[in-house]
Image (cartoon, coloured by chain):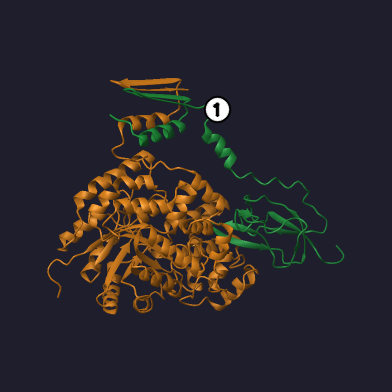
Amino acid sequence: MTISPHDIEAIVRLFKSSGYGELRVKLGDLSIVVSKDSSPRSAETSAAAGAKPAERAATASNDVAGAIVVRAPVAGTFYRAPSPAAEPFCKPGDRIAANTTLGLVEVMKLFTSIQAGVVGTVAHIAAQNGALVEAGEPLVLIQPDEAGT
Amino acid sequence: MSAPGPTIRIVDTTLRDGQQCLWATRMSTAMMLPIAKQMDRAGFDAIELVGAVQFDAAIRYLKEDPWERVRLIRERVRHTPLQALIRSKCVLGFDQQPDDIANLWVERLVANGIRRFVAFDGLHDLDNLIGSLRHAKALGAYTTGWLTFSDSPVHTDELYVRKAREFIDRAGVDAVMIEDASGVLTPERARTLVPKLKQAIGSLSLGLHSHGLLGLPQRTYLEAVALGVDNVYTCIPPLADANAPPSVFTTIQNLRYRGFDVGVDVAALESVAAHFEAVAARDDKPRGRPMDFDASSFGHQIPGGVLSNLTAQLKTAGLAHKLPEVLEECSRVRSELGWPIQVTPFAQLIGVQATLNVIRGERYGVVPDEVKKYALGYYGKLLSPVEPDILDRIVTNGSKAIALTPRPPEPALPALRRRYPGASDDELLLYHSFDSAIVDAMRQNRPDYDAYAIAEKPFLHLLREIAKRPPVSRITISKGDFSIELRE
């Protein structure tokens, strides 16, 4: 039996994917020793690091006086941006028109754009990005431009 | 008439459609490499390898480079042409791509080893395909226009004849085929459709690709080849039957019994089937099996995947008992929307809108963006118009951010080149269609292409198996002058 450079690469890769800390292979006068420090399996750490941190839950209260509550029309997943890498549609303080898209509710891979239907200012984002929302759940609070609120 | 024993050619779609139907498109390159050469020896007319969905799965879930898959397979498949699927002017999802992207996809697929293309548009709006098909031909590829079979008042034999002629006249295709994604093409319908198509396309090749979920393909294939179809699509078990295309073994056996000449070496495929069976056993993957006719599925024609999603959605809403109502609503919505095909992605439009209608108790009160775009012609010209008062509701209740008239997308390459200077065309296409973080994660991963090697060296196999298991404090194995030791 022979060990090729390709095999060595495979050995190292397989060893890395295992839970072992040290590997020794001997074949005739060929000896291979591979070791890693005794940290937890790298798979776990990278999975934790790679996961998108959930958006911090909005801490402001939901009862902003006079605000219009824009609610999820159906149960689904709420997204604040058109795609994972893109900027959110809106943030508190933004001025909006009646047909400005504030977010998306995804149902079985189809996306429903959520709009306020009024001119105003975004007061508060009530639901987390990527969260499962129920029908009627508050998503965004808007301070409308009407007089007398 | 034809000489005794006309030849029927077989196109294999195990690596594209079989695994898409049965393994959720999660067949990795490593699973394909060990048997690629053997598949090349079998005598297939073509091996269908990729569509956009395979790219998506490779990048997102398997974290491997789909372009590299094409190259690696091409290295091993030297004689049989590799085939790629083009869906409309889309990559993933519903949105139409600019021409520069659509053309670059064709170029890069050819550059990486693809020699044949099949192209389809769910609305049969061939404006969405002409550019890509002509470009492919100009690059020397063999092109096939794919007619998506659907059972509806607008999907008549006459429509298919018109579209076949349009494929030939406007796109100069080398061949035409019928794709029956829902597996609902009956021998009876083939008896009218196939002769009319044959007459319309003359000496051009006519293919048929069906799916086994209602137990029809074996009989429909036999009827079709007797009437002029000259190539059929199959898969290698266990990635065959059920909602995948029919088994190559059963199909060829039946064809030969009926006197057709099939130039495929079935014996050469036994080891390929054994390999996929071993992969299925090892990784706990589903196996296809022949299905029986189910009248309700034949009636509503909703694809299995959409049906299971609808059921889950209703359960979540506490409305599981409303499933029969939703199935009825699907038929109603399909009719109102102008009879889109009951095939992905249009099957989702129908299913989701029907579910929303039932859950809300108000028809078209909530309209997903995609339904409004579909209705306004964003995906292509509709074969039959949306019912006027339904269109009104869709326009009124759907997103106001969607313009009433679609605008063709702007070319995307200039901005992409500026954003990713130094990136290859292959990379640019990935960055265009996928999140850059996901593409980068894929590129950082180094897949183990030997993971399923048949003749893996025993000590590597041993190490692989040990590595998979929870570690013990020490293992030592030795034989002769070979020893291996692992410590925690």
Q: Residue furthest left?
A: B4
The amino acid pointed to by label 1 is Ser
Pick whichever, B344 or B488, lies toward us: B488
Residue beneath disc 1: A39
Q: Residue furthest right?
A: A148
Residue at 53% across / 74% down in the picture? B377
Q: Relative to residue B444, is residue A98 depicted above or below?
A: below
Pick whichever, B482 or B311, lies toward us: B482
Number of numbered tags placed on the structure image: 1
Colour of the chain lettered A: green
Q: Residue B350 at what x, y percent from top left?
A: 50, 65
Q: Quadrant of residue A39 in the image? A: top right
- Can residue B300 be seen in this snapshot? no
Q: Residue B3 at what x, y percent from top left?
A: 13, 71
Q: Residue B99 at what x, y percent from top left?
A: 49, 70
Q: Relative to residue A50, is residue A146 depicted above or below?
A: below
Residue at 42% across / 56% down in the picture? B304
Q: Relative to residue B117, is residue A48 depicted above or below?
A: above
Q: Residues within 10 Å of mark 1 (few under 14, many from 20)?
A: few
Q: Residue A34 at what x, y percent from top left?
A: 45, 27
